[in-house]
Image (tube, rainbow, N blue to C red):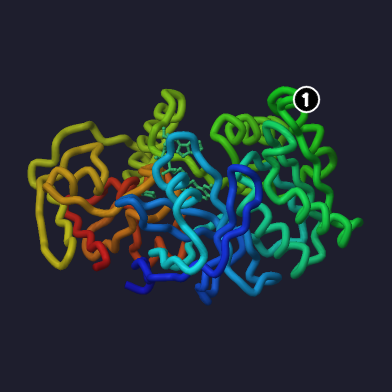
Amino acid sequence: MARDHGFHPVRITRIVAETDDARTFVLDAPWPYRAGQFVTFRACGALRSYSMSSSPDTDGELMTTVKRVPGGLVSNWMLDNLVSGDVVEVTRPAGIFCLRETSAPLVAFCGGSGVTPILSLVKSALATTRRRVRVLLANKDADAIIFRSVLAELADRYPDRLEVHHHLDVLNGFVTATQIRNFVNVDTHADFYICGPAPFMDLTEAALRDHGAGADQILVERFGSADASPAEQAEQDSLAADAVADASGGAVPAAEPREDGTVTIVLNGKKHTVPQHPGETLLQSARRAGLAPPFSCEAGNCATCIAQITAGEAKMRVNNALDDDEVAEGLILTCQGEPVSADITVVYED
Ligand SMILES: Cc1cc2nc3c(=O)[nH]c(=O)nc-3n(C[C@H](O)[C@H](O)[C@H](O)COP(=O)(O)OP(=O)(O)OC[C@H]3O[C@@H](n4cnc5c(N)ncnc54)[C@H](O)[C@@H]3O)c2cc1C
Ligand code: FES
């Protein structure tokens, strides 16, 4: 497999307290990466992705920033237990929430820990392009703002190119569609980056679409897991139906069981074959075969469920993690992949 998706031992060089609830973990991981990408940690028997807050163009070290999620398994463990010098297990960087080759302005909307990949993108855009950059950063209150001083320093250094607007819920309530449209103002031709809590992202994306932004102008990074709301689930189901319709030239096949279809999964070097069940993802088929392949978000965001298709074809319902080259190479997010050929074989990397 071309892509190294294994876990590597990495030492934590130091830990920086950003707010009461957020820490930056500086990692001794001299890997190339693109601004906006993430790494995945294996901890507490779970897999969790964290975006880089550093930029490969301005920072000598790779840094991820983690915000505590109330009741959350891994974020709390990392903040409460890890100390400088500890060794953690981490994948190499991945993800497609990256800068594009364009001179259009970059307009970003982020909330809470969603500022992490946005900071990485902002630093790289300022350092390597002449693009104008504008950020609307929403937080509950001033104490919750992560990277307030870093963004202020950047705005001082690039007064003609960077504008940062802080929205505080305690003062102004939640961000509204009108505020999103007003922030866009004349920059309707911008690339729009969105990262934050799901309702904030949904509202922002809808407001941008209403304001005339094309789908190709909007880039999203979703931190969420598969605990989808009914609306999100309905949207995913509809996307799934569209994906299957695409694969079949527009006609959605009847949900008949494939009598002769099979899914073959190779995990830890062992081959397992089960009959295909319509509407089932490759990850679900693997579980039905009694296997426990890797996964985390189950929403197409984190790439921890990645596998290589070695025979047959599948379509992904949602893909927020693999780039076009990786898809062309046959890599698939198994939590999102549904077979579109009678027989299919996927191999998980050892
Ligand atoms: C591509 C990607 C990049 C990410 N980058 C970052 C990052 O830079 N910084 C960061 O802090 N997090 C980031 N996340 C989120 C992170 O991976 C975890 O989901 C988060 O830390 C919660 O994990 P947990 O084990 O603490 O909570 P869990 O035990 O998984 O969840 C506990 C409860 O909290 C809910 N929950 C899960 N995630 C969130 C969330 N993000 N916000 C609110 N509620 C949640 C769950 O539905 C569950 O009810 C990223 C996620 C993805 C997919
Ligand atoms: S489990 Fe996150 S993309 Fe599949």
Q: Is residue 132 left or right of residue 295?
A: right
- Which amino acid is tagged 1? Leu
Name the residue located 33 percent from the left edge and 51 percent from the top edge.
Answer: 44
| Residue 202 visible, this angle | yes
Q: Residue at x 32, y 54 (%)?
A: 305
Q: Is residue 187 above or below residue 241?
A: below
Between 108 and 139, the residue placed more toward the observer is 139
Relative to 243, 213 lies left or right: right
- Quadrant of the rendered structure where residue 6 is? bottom left
Q: Give residue 5's position: percent from left, percent from top.
A: 36, 66
Occupied quadrant, residue 73: top left
Task: Give the farthest residue toward the right.
Answer: 160
Residue 29 image position (x, y, % from top left)? 50, 73
Quadrant that contains the C terminus = bottom left
Secondary-structure class at tag 1 = helix
From the top left corner, tell me how far across and down residue 83 is, in percent: 49, 60
